[in-house]
Amino acid sequence: MSPPALPSDRDLIQRALQLARQGRPEQAESVLQDVLRRNSDSLDARALLGALAFRQHRYEEAVAAYGICAGARPRNGSFQFNLGIAREKAGDLPGAIDALLAACRLNRRDWRMALFAGAALEAAGRRDEAAVVFSLGDDVDPAMRAARNNPALDPEIRRRSAIADRVMREHFSRLHARAVDECERRAVAASGVKPDLARVRNAIWTQTHDRPFKFRTPRQEPSVFYMPDLEARPVTPRERLPWAAKIEAAADEIRGEYLAALAADVAMAPYVDASEKSPTWQGLRGNLDWSALHLYKSAQGTPLRSHFRKTLQVLEAADVVRVEDGNPIEMFFSRMRRGAHIPPHFGAANNRLTVHLPLIVPTGCSIRVGDQIHTWREGELFAFDDSFEHEAWNTSDTDRVVLIFESHHPDLNAAERAAVEHAFESRGRWLKERRRPVL
């Protein structure tokens, strides 16, 4: 009779896991040591030994175990992460940062990696680098900062989430203040006169403001930028827009270019991207019921501009919001199919107006802004502050089409406009130029 086969390494590791779950860590470690005596290259056994040592606060042993694993598999993000946390607990903050940053690079889509690496950087006094790492994690998923308010999560996750939220709020608030200061210095250097930029200085970046605030006007909640000292007006009369008549006079030509583009098989695209996560847009994500033909999107011109030379020429007369390179932030033809409904939502900022030039408006098409309901009239501009809750519907049997662009709030003077635009540009430049800290 042959002797019974020895248990495999996998069987022994499963036995060790079972013992650990039963609250018998010493026996589990003994089994794992048996595995390593037979096979010193078993990273599974080594990693489990590290985990058991970590749970018992033997952090130096955990560092040693995870260090071997990370050394053998340097591109394994989990090994780097565990090594970083163990080093942090052992008091080796620089070493922890190195490992946690490596984990970030290897797991760019996991916001938890950014959360732990950013918190370690902040603990080391590397505040600006922490802001970069936290912001990259926030780009992946806003859940990183929201975790602080979720009692179901691990307390350590919540603690670091609170650090991330604070660091980002402080960083972006300083960035805004510096941008306004710089505008003041430029104005004084150019004219010798210090402009009154108090309304811009008091502006609130709603997602990253460093102090509690409340929206002052019912149904006005801009999602990005809020100037509380600016007059809150849902709809701006056409008389406040001295350039309106010039745009309206060209409505027929603009409509003609739009129809000619469709006849040339220029395709509309869903306005709400299929990847949009917000439940507000569940019914419209990736859906052509609300579609767009963009001339400019995210301040970038599209190839479709070649079909709209007259439209672009006419809009030179409008007070279009343009960014540093002179491009409009957004300019597009918006189509609502019959039966379509754009649900109630808030726009990004109250320092600018959303302007509609209605081109095709069948009976049964309206928009609500705040408490006001407006019915578009073909060829007549409609300007509103989309930071107020608004929605639109088309109950007709045909499409509704309007040309949309953004204009400055008419109550802002030239110095304030420049300061607001510089604040946006400064924030955008920082986001574009940020780089992950080097090891």
Image: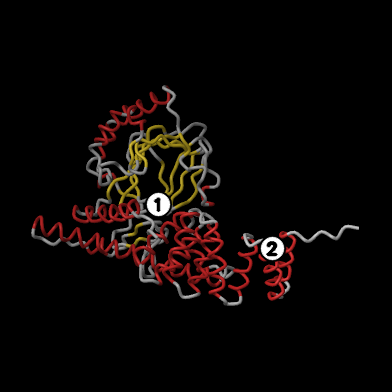
In this image, 12 relative to 154: left or right?
right
Q: Nearer the viewer, residue 139 or 230?
A: 139
Q: Are marks 2 and 1 in contact (CB under 8 Å)?
A: no
Does 311 sit above or below residue 384? Answer: above
Frontmost residue, 319 versus 268: 268
Quadrant of res 17: bottom right
Q: Earlier in the sequence, mark 2 or mark 1?
A: 2
Query: Residue 364: in sight, yes or no?
Result: no
- Element type at mark 1: loop
| Residue nearer the viewer, 107 or 92 | 92
Q: Amino acid at mark 1?
A: Gly
User: In the image, 33: left or right of 260?
Assistant: right
Please name the residue shown 31% across and 60% down the image: 227
Q: Residues within 10 Å of mark 1 (few under 14, many from 20)?
A: some
Image quadrant holding the N terminus, namely: bottom right
Given the current orientation, which residue lies at the most extreme right position? Answer: 1
Q: Quadrant location of the C terminus? A: bottom left
* Residue 114 horizontal/vertical position (percent): 46, 61
Residue drawn at point x = 51 percent, y = 52 percent: 278
Q: Which residue in the protein does label 2 denote?
A: 38
Q: Which residue is pictured at 64% across the width and 60% down the height? A: 42
Of circles 2 and 1, which is in front?
A: 2
Q: In the figure, 50 relative to 185: above or below?
A: below
271 w.r.t. 348: above or below: above
Q: Is residue 114 above or below residue 354?
A: below
Check disc 2 and give the amino acid type: Arg
* Camera-nearest residue between 137 and 291: 137
Give the Cα distance between marks 2 and 1.
64 Å
Query: Which dot marks residue 347?
Result: 1
